[in-house]
Image: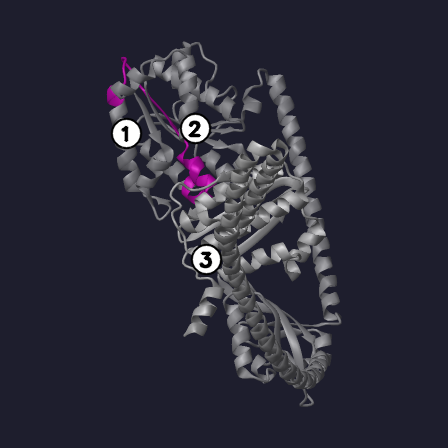
Amino acid sequence: MSMGKSSVHDSGFFKRSTETPARRHRYHSGHAVQFYGDDGAFLDSLGQSVGAALESGDAVIVIATKAHRNGLAQRLKARGLDTAAAIERGRYVLIDATETLSKFLLEGWPDATRFADIMGKTIARARAAAEGDDPGIFAFGEMVALLWAEGKSGAAFRLEQLWNELAKTHSFTLRCAYPMKKFDREEHGELFLKICAEHSDVIPGESYTALGSEEERLRNISFLQQKVQVLDWERAERLEIEKSLRLKEAELAELLENAPEGAQQTGPDQKILWANNALLKLFGYRPEEFVGHHLSEFFVQDNTLEEFWGKLMRREEVIDFPAEFRCKDGSIKHVLIHSNGLWKDGQFVRTRSFIRDVTERNEMIQALKLAHEELEMRVSERTAELEQKNLQIVEQARILEMTNRDLRELSARLLHVQDDERRRIARDLHDGTGQMLALLSMTLSGLEAEAGKFSPELAMGLAENVEIVKEVSAELRTLSYLLHPPLLDETGLESALRWYVDGFGKRSGIEVALDLPGDLGRLSRDLETAIYRIVQECLTNIHRHSESPTATIRLSQLPGQIALEIKDEGKGIPQEKLSKIASTGLPGVGLRGMRERIMDFDGELEITSRAKGTDIKIIIPLDATARGVRLADSRAL
């Protein structure tokens, strides 16, 4: 394949010709390079060349990225080409550029032997599949563009040369392509010309190839010359800017030299390269006594220097590093060092350090430390005194706790005795007074019958007295049941609660909903009595204070616990009173008695109230024994 001097193409990849469009690409056999700015226009141009080659029976090899292969496929499909058949016959070969590069690159450099073997075999197979009397091969490759994008310009240039060497043994037409945006630096200019020199044809970007006349091309060239002039001017301006920057650097160096804070530079051998006036004045040295000397001559402690230098060698930025420096007069300066290292190509060049004197500050800190220690001593003495007072308070609290415990035990005992006394009085009223009233009622009834024979008026009076005795007997029975319902001992808590709630609803007019578990069973006598009294007290409070038309009682049995919840929809407890209940205990005899009964069983009481309604929740362990019973048992022992 013959390679001539490179030339800029006047109308894309095709020269004007009298040949049919299907054969035009054959007139530029050689090694062409196309520079493009827009992917779409580039793929349109490539699609025309590939389409013309396939239509003429030539073989086509496309070595491209996936995105460009997909874009090319869309354009060939729009052209009406059956690429699937060409691919199946081996006449249309699609190869991934990245994958192909990896096959012949050794340590980032194209290997000539591997390249010739891989691409030579590919071209040979494609030639065998070509059709027609004089079949040709059109190849497109953008492996060079991938190498250039990775910054491997030398490898890209070498690959262009390998294509030219391959053309000496194989006949094919090759087009390479580079995105113009990758040639965006001044130093790219020489390489750009070298790449063009390796090609027989150079196809400019679409902004030039789209021009249809010689006049338009000349105008475009003039415009490009103007842009070159602008770039030359910008280059001169950049040189002026660089000169200005050097001047600024000199001014900055002068500023640093005369800065009020010390600054120095140290080389990789730990010798001081430069120090400003402030640092020399701080330590009292002349420049020749400080610059060029080893850091170890000035660091008071060797381990401090080792730690400081170790941080720099680990590429750490050293901030406020404390150190002690030796001055010329033998005094010691306490300083804080802010330093970092300058590295080039992995090699340490020098440190840049700012050194601030904190000697006076440290002396003040030391004075404050002494004052703090004295204060600590006084605080310790005062603390010991307070601890002694605290021990006295603790002892008083212990005595108070014992007194409170005795009072709680007495209260629990009184509640237990009160329940026993209520039970006894209720039994006496029922068995004694109740029986006497029953006998009186029977006697009066008999007298009524006899008196009817002699005096109707007397019989009527006796009848009225019989009714009065019956009412007194009923009231006495109710009083007895309220003191202690016999159902509580005979059938248990469930029956007693149902009896009491039913009677309470009739007496008060409050609708009470009672929710009891189906498998409640019997509890201990004391626990059943406590729950009954709590319900009794809550309903009494609802009737007296809340003005609620309804109330809800829910008793539920949890694992190891029994829970009681009582709700109403009446007036809530005022917030200030509720806070007082939470902080200082329950006011009122009724609520205090409830709390004592609950505490007697190590239970928990929670009261929540809103503007409308109050909710009381109680949790009692099932295995708890009343404190009053425990106290009585301990005294019996």
The x, y position of residue 267, in whole percent, is 56, 72
Q: Nearer the viewer, residue 213 or 115?
A: 115
Instruction: Confirm whether the magenta stretch covers residue 69.
Output: no
The x, y position of residue 449, in whole percent, is 53, 35
Residue to which mark 1 is pinned: 122
Vertical comparison of 603 with 633: above or below: above
- The label shown at residue 526 is 3
Magenta stretch: give its range: 127-156
Mark 3 / mark 2, whichever is N-terminal = 2
Tell me the distance, in whole angstroms, between the alpha carbons under discs 3 and 1.
102 Å
The residue lying at 63 percent from left, 82 percent from top is 392
Query: What amino acid type is highlighted by mark number 1?
Result: Thr
Counting labels gives: 3
Q: Nearer the viewer, residue 40 or 443?
A: 443
Mark 3 touches mark 2? (CB < 8 Å): no
Is residue 9 at least partly visible in the picture?
no
Mark 1 touches mark 2? (CB < 8 Å): no
Determine the image quadrant of residue 189. top right
Q: Nearer the viewer, residue 568 or 128?
A: 568
Relative horizontal placement of residue 165, taking residue 40 as reference (left or right): left
Relative horizontal placement of residue 517, taking residue 61 as reference (left or right): right
Determine the image quadrant of residue 128. top left
Residue to which mark 2 is pinned: 67
Is residue 506 at least partly visible in the picture?
yes
Vertical comparison of 281 with 240: above or below: below
The x, y position of residue 299, in whole percent, is 59, 82
Mark 1 / mark 2, whichever is N-terminal = 2
